Image: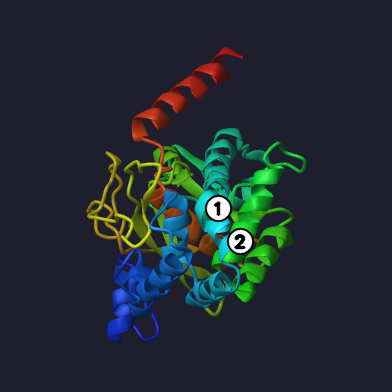
Amino acid sequence: MNKPEISIPGAEDEIVRFILSNPVPEFGDPGRAGIIAQISSELGIGMVDPSVRALLWLADVEALLALRDGCMGSRAAFRLLLGHGGILFRDALTSWACDMLESWAEFTEDPFDLCRERDQRCVITRDVKKTRTVNVYPHRPAGASNAGSRATLWEALGVFWGEPRVAGWRQAVFGCGGANKLGNTMLLRDDVSQAWASLHFALRPVELSRDLKSLSVQFFWLPGQQCPSDVPLLSLPAFGPDNTGGWGFRNPWNSRRLQSGDFLRLLTHDPERCPLPSFELLEIQWYLHRAAALSGLSIPPQICLLDELQRRGGSEST
């Protein structure tokens, strides 16, 4: 299989190369640490919930500046929001993590024959056998019990990311009928889908071709460590060497084990009838998978395997 030729505009630039090789390029922004330090000093907060730290270090700089200015104008309210109210942001990320796993466990193939026709193989490993359709953005039925947490999630997005970006995300989600259409699906091998749903890797959308037939993405392993209940706000969340969690996926283009930063390509033969996964939905996943993993919400692989065995056992007995 020939390696995909990925041509990224500006890839020869040192800053662009840094961004493309880094799972958390936000950490390299020289101004970010200073703004977060100002927020910490203004509010007198040194220790926070891991979710607050993760979201602040991944947030848009413009949103950080707005938070800093808000802290200066209303210390008590923002101390409550980022300090004692941190549990709300944790609940929002926990909702995302749980929805991913529940959506994966409950997903049915029938409405998405077009996804299988479009992808044909696992979009990560290019395997044909033992594949299943998964949601990019976890679809939950209207009136589901998680409606309150999902609303909190959107409120959190509005706090840490700018309005134009969040508006684009909303349009993508609700333009997909609550994210239950073809643009919200991918075909993955069973074990790859487990790792996806349990936050062990994330995909960074990079470039959609002009003819809409090809979408370049990058694969990044995510940290799987647990976090204490409170962490130092000014210390970077841990994001060390690749933590594969025991998953043994191989890059189909070079036959080596998948490594963080590897480029992959999603393809479609008919962008009108079988559109590719939404760039914006993948972008939501890119931010929230990382934020949840850095908050200690990844699910250990052995638990994923046990849940899958129990699920299959229950299916076979009915």
Location of residue 181 in the rendering, given as x and y in whole percent from the top left corner: 68, 53
Instruction: Specify the quadrant of the image occupied by residue 37.
Output: bottom left
Front residue of this view, candidates 259 and 223:
223
Q: CA distance from mark 2 to mark 1?
A: 35 Å
Dots 2, 1 in contact, CB < 8 A: no
Which comes sooner in the sequence, label 2 or label 1? Answer: 2
Choose mark 2 or mark 1, whichever is in front. Answer: 2
Q: Residue at x 30, y 87 (%)?
A: 13
- Label 2: element kind: helix
> For the N terminus, which image quadrant?
bottom left
Q: Is residue 40 visible?
A: yes
Q: Residue at x 56, y 51 (%)?
A: 85
Which residue extends farthest right? Answer: 143
Location of residue 229 in the rendering, given as x and y in whole percent from the top left corner: 40, 42
Q: Residue at x 65, y 48 (%)?
A: 150
Instruction: Specify the quadrant of the image occupied by residue 274.
Output: bottom right
Q: Is residue 93 above or below residue 3?
A: above
- Three-letter amino acid code of the residue under disc 1: Val
Q: Residue at x 34, y 68 (%)?
A: 27
Front residue of this view, candidates 69 and 241:
69
- Left or right placement of residue 194 versus residue 154 in this view: left
Q: Is residue 243 above or below residue 239?
A: above
Q: Is residue 269 visible?
A: no
Which residue extends farthest top? Answer: 317
Location of residue 149 in the rendering, given as x and y in whole percent from the top left corner: 64, 45
Q: Which residue in the protein does label 1 denote? A: 136
- Label 1: element kind: loop
- Three-letter amino acid code of the residue under disc 2: Ala
Q: Which residue in the protein does label 2 denote? A: 77
Task: Bin the neighbour count of mark 2 within 10 Å (Cα to Cα): few under 14, some 14-19, many 20 and up.
Answer: some
